[in-house]
Image (cartoon, helix red, strand yellow):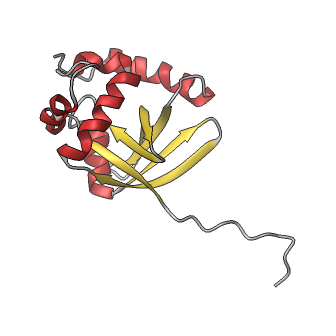
Amino acid sequence: MRQYRPSSWRRAVDSVMGEFVRMGVVPRTYLLTTRGRRTGRPLTHPATVVEEDGRRWLVSPYGQVSWVRNARASGRVSLARRRDRHDYAVREVSAREAGPVLKRYVAVATATRPYFQARKDSPVEDFVAEADRHPVFELVTLNEDPAPDPRRAE
């Protein structure tokens, strides 16, 4: 299993990938923005979203990275793709709940497979066993107040 190490090469790849994501040409991938837990500055990274049965999940294939710590601290993230941006509350899930999500993630996010011990055809139990190394968050839509209709007089 490969170990994640941030580097200038990784930042360059993320920057290029971010442009492709911004254009909407990378399937299931969004620009994930969290607020720095110390600085309060917005930090953005490409992230693949797993969707199943009407639910959406964020997976950290690289473990306890900065966006994970920031999401835990604030309980919120934003996802952007093309011109759409949505805010979500996040709920970190248990290993048992994360197992099926991790299995689905490995099937769709092929570039991150080397960071997992379980293979795409492994049973869900193998993904549950390594869930502590790959945090999973359920995305919970925040109730956004719709903009007032300018045609309605009050």
146 is higher (above) or lower (below) than 94: below
**Of the pair 127 and 38, the residue shown nearer to us:** 127
Q: Is residue 37 visible?
A: no
Give coordinates of residue 89: x percent, y percent: 40, 57
Q: How many marks do you count on the picture?
A: 0
Q: Examine the image and state in which quarter residue 74 appears.
A: bottom left
- Rendered residue at 84%/76% (across/down): 152
76 is higher (above) or lower (below) than 110: below
14 is higher (above) or lower (below) than 34: above
- Rendered residue at 62%/27% (across/down): 23
Where's the N terminus, which quadrant?
top left
- Rendered residue at 32%/41% (across/down): 67
Q: Residue furthest left?
A: 129
Give coordinates of residue 19: x percent, y percent: 55, 24
Give left or right: position of 146 versus 48.
right
14 is higher (above) or lower (below) than 99: above
**Of the pair 89 and 4, the residue shown nearer to us:** 89
Give left or right: position of 38 versus 144.
left
Give coordinates of residue 110: x percent, y percent: 37, 17
